[in-house]
Amino acid sequence: MQQIVYLLHVLGVVVWVGGMFFAYMALRPVAASVLEPPQRLTLWAGVFGKFFPWVWLSVALILLTGLHMLVTFGGASAPLYALAMLVLGVAMMLIFAHVFFAPYKKLKRAVAAQEWKMGGAALGQIRMLIGINLSIGLLTIAVVFLGRWLISGAT
């Protein structure tokens, strides 16, 4: 059972952080260089419309499996890296919820109304917040693996 919980947790992380990495490091620069604002903003509204339901599923999986593993570790006596993972993960979830309910909502409204300047501002805010979340996600992965390595006494 524990292996399934761990697998679901890692799959959630891979989908979310991997999706952000692809969007930020590959899709964003190409879209910015080859598409005019109406096409670019329409593309991003569509991409987020497909990606964000997967992020919500990932958030639910990560939170539920993470809490399960923390309880298994013994709650407050869990290793420091596990508690750091919880804090960083919750911060990421809050940032994502803000992206979803504020700038993404503005982006969808702007694209529907063909208000490209407003859409560009919303996309700029989303880009900044996804960059922050991607950085936190990569940091969290590093914290977990370095924490586990240090605890195991590996050299």
Image: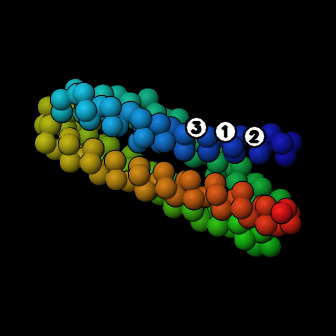
Q: Amino acid at mark 2?
A: Leu
The residue positioned 37% from the left and 50% from the top of the image is: 99
The residue positioned 13% from the left and 42% from the top of the image is: 117
Q: In the picture shown, does residue 30 fall above or below 17?
A: above
Q: Which residue is mark 1?
A: 11
| Residues at marks 1 and 3, CA–CA distance in whole angstroms | 6 Å
Q: In the picture shown, does residue 58 fall above or below 43?
A: below
Residue 83: give x, y in percent of width and height: 68, 67
Residue 7 visible, this angle: yes
- Quadrant of the image containing the C terminus: bottom right
| Residues at marks 1 and 2, CA–CA distance in whole angstroms | 6 Å
Residue 49 visible, this angle: no
Horizontal side of 125 relative to 62 (left or right) equals left
Neighbour tally class for label 3: few under 14, some 14-19, many 20 plus, Cα within 10 Å:
some
Residue 7: give x, y in percent of width and height: 75, 40
The residue positioned 80% from the left and 39% from the top of the image is: 4
Instruction: Verify CB contact (< 8 Å) between mark 2 and mark 3.
Output: no
Residue 146: give x, y in percent of width and height: 71, 61
Q: Amino acid at mark 3?
A: Val
Horizontal side of 130 relative to 149 (left or right) equals left
> Between residues 61 and 140, which one lies in front from this camera angle?
140
Instruction: Verify CB contact (< 8 Å) between mark 1 and mark 2.
Output: yes
Neighbour tally class for label 1: few under 14, some 14-19, many 20 plus, Cα within 10 Å:
some
Instruction: Verify CB contact (< 8 Å) between mark 1 and mark 3.
Output: yes
Q: Which residue is mark 2?
A: 7
Horizontal side of 16 relative to 154 (left or right) equals left
Specify which label sits upstream in the sequence, 2 or 3.
2
Horizontal side of 41 relative to 77 (left or right) equals left
Q: Which residue is mark 3?
A: 15
Q: Secondary structure at mark 2?
A: helix
